[in-house]
Image (cartoon, rainbow, N blue to C red):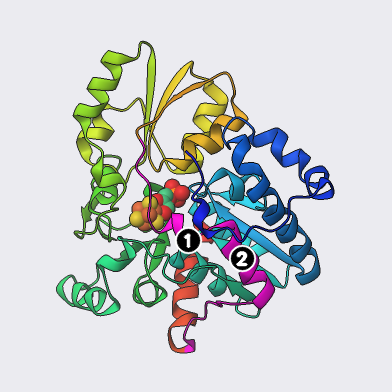
Amino acid sequence: MPILMNEFDGLPFTEAVAARTADVFDRVKDVILEVEWPLVAPEIDAIRRLKRERNAIVLAHNYQTPDIFHGVADIVGDSLALARRAAETEADVIVQAGVHFMAETAKLVNPDKTVLLPDLQAGCSLAASITGADVRLLREAYPGVPIVTYVNTSAEVKAEADICCTSGNAVRIVESLDAPRVIVLPDEYLANYIAGQTDVEIIGWHGRCEVHERFAGEEIDAFREGYDGLTVIAHPECPPDVLDAADFVGSTAQMIDYVASKRPGRVLLMTECSMSDNVAVEVPDTEFVRPCNLCPHMKRITLPKIRRALESLSPEVMVDDAIASKARESVERMLAVA
Ligand code: 13P
Ligand code: SF4
């Protein structure tokens, strides 16, 4: 997928820049067009320098474009890995190449560090689907039933929950509560997937990921007809007919591990589009069949915005003190379980 170039400031592409970024070009040359490189390389070079000057790290979600993922990220992964690694860093500044709830999570586990989100409008349809007041009403409606909230929620919502989960640990988190019924918020499809994996009764909510809800089971049938020997891997935020038709279901990190270990000849990842580019760099012998559903929020993060965030140390993500300690407890309880 070509990079969106209208953001770029045209920093000079010199021989020195080319030499300092040659290692990245070597990795990404199959997924970044050569014509794009003179714009991309100076940004990567400047960000690498700024990271050293600021004692900063870049956390990048698996849905970031390959220029960010392979070019400037210090830590990459799914939401669980990013939350874990954010809690371990000794850097002074964390740049979240991801969306707002991820930056809030990084801030919750690093209250004294500067956490930057290069575009504050990088939101998430799941996080937008529920408020703290909704969670309080659910608690009243279901007294004594524990509440698990997906990390794809605001800190305000996490503060009202008992514990967080990610797509990588959701079943383990639900079962760790030792309760016959558990409320799982806000992703309807993730809750449905968990319900199919456990004897615990799951009460859900009506949130959906605007990227994954667009996939359909019949698309998989059509792809299987067109491509012999296709392995289909789906994210649990997809609708149930997609999960039923897939060969494997898992978080983005679990999907990557599956491809890296099984090395299928042909694979279709039913998830955000950039992930195929990022994984293709690691497994050159696998052919990726690519329906391209982009997350408009993830795509708000670009190299120039990361550079400007490091130059200005803004925009910074803060979490209100009144909710931070309760929200942190929900995240830390999750990290202690799985
Ligand atoms: P994971 O990377 O945790 O699987 O989450 C996917 C996602 O949609 C994050 O926004
Ligand atoms: Fe939210 Fe879906 Fe985008 Fe992830 S891919 S940030 S769940 S809208």
Question: Which residue is identified by label 2?
Answer: 95
Quick check: 67 above or below 311?
A: above
Query: Which residue is more in the foreground, 285 or 113?
Result: 285
Please, what is the three-letter code of the amino acid marked with disc 1?
Met
Residue drawn at point x = 48 percent, y = 67 percent: 331
Comparing 18 with 71, the one in front is: 18
Dot 2 amino acid type:
Val
Q: Tell me where residue 255 appears, x and y as whole percent.
A: 46, 35
* Residue 294 appears in the figure: yes
Query: For the point 23% across and 46% down, which residue is it?
Result: 192
Classify residue 261 by image quadrant.
top right
Magenta part of the chain: 292-321
5 left or right, relative to 195: right
Image coordinates of residue 89 in percent, x first then y, are 70, 64
Which residue position holds label 1? 334
Q: Is residue 139 depicted above or below 125 in this figure?
A: below
Q: Is the residue 324 above or below the residue 195 in the image?
A: below
Picture quadrant of residue 216: top left
- Residue 132 position within the rendered picture, expressed as x and y whole percent measured from the top left: 29, 77
**Can residue 176 be seen here?**
no
State how far apart marks 2 and 1 are (Cα).
23 Å
Are dots 2 and 1 in contact, CB under 8 Å?
Answer: no
